[in-house]
Amino acid sequence: MSDNSLIHDNERLDDLERNGYKIIQDKNRFCFGMDAVLLSAFAKAKPTDKVIDLGTGTGIIPILMEARGFGGELYGLEIQKESADMADRSVRYNKLEDKISIVEGDIKDVSTRFGASSFNVVTTNPPYMIGQHGLQNSNMEKTIARHEVYCTLDDILRESARLLKPKGHFYMVHRPFRLAEIMSKMVDYRIEPKRMRLVYPYADKEPNMILIEGIRGAKSRMTVEPPLIVYEKNGEYTEEIKHIYYD
């Protein structure tokens, strides 16, 4: 099968600016954003770690983590058949089949599928909106990606706690308006919050993203990292964002 045969009608091939990797996307479906890129840089995994990305969408997080040298065996779980197929084709396009596996499935029963304590690292860029909160897109695929249609924060944290080995690491990007709920539920599921970083579009604006790391069964002690600023006053990326994207 030729590389071009992996790209279907209405799809495009985007350059990830790392290792020559590219990713297949469809503008009519949910395309990855900065949140996924930031999470892939915030998360850490040893070269021997087994890693799973819950709700992987286009497969962007496993592909970028592999490009950064994180993880030895990576999985991406995606409930939407078309998105899972697209992610799998991106893996094959980049010839990463020996490193990354895309699995079609439901977050709510992923621990039954893979088994308890089977991963060193869990990453997730989940739907941010609760039910009807915020405007829902008329495109169902995009609504599923942005709203808790198929899974809730509880589902994600419950299954992550089951999937993680003791002292395994959990990484998530979310929205600050749900921070109190996130912290409370992480503790409830014994994923102790250990590291947090707020992301600000501009230095004088409110944060619009939060990056958070937890460890299963760890003791209570948390580090709050310096703010991550995305744009300079002139609208250009800050040096740190350029480093995350291109170095």
Image: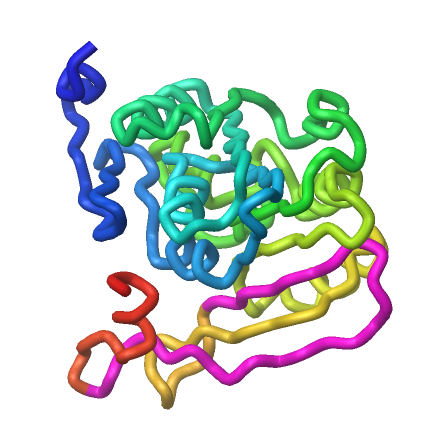
Q: Quadrant of residue 216?
A: bottom right
| Residue interval drawn in magenta | 209-233
The structure residue drawn at horizontal position 73% and vertical position 66%, both measured from the top left corner, is 193
For the C terminus, the image quarter is bottom left
Please tell me which residue is depicted at 29% across the width and 62% down the height of the picture: 245
Residue under the point 54% across and 51% down = 129
- Across and down, in percent, residue 19 comes to 26, 46
Is residue 119 toward the left or the right of residue 210 in the image?
right
Q: Where is residue 239 in the image (x, y as percent from the top left)?
A: 27, 79
Residue 29 magenta: no
| Front-most of residues 180 and 232 | 232
Above or below, 15 relative to 5: below
Q: Is residue 237 visible?
A: yes
Task: State the image coordinates of residue 150 (x, y, percent, origin top left).
Answer: 59, 32
Q: x%, y% of residue 230?
A: 33, 75
Q: Which residue is drawn at 76% across and 26% down?
A: 115
The extreme front residue here reads 48
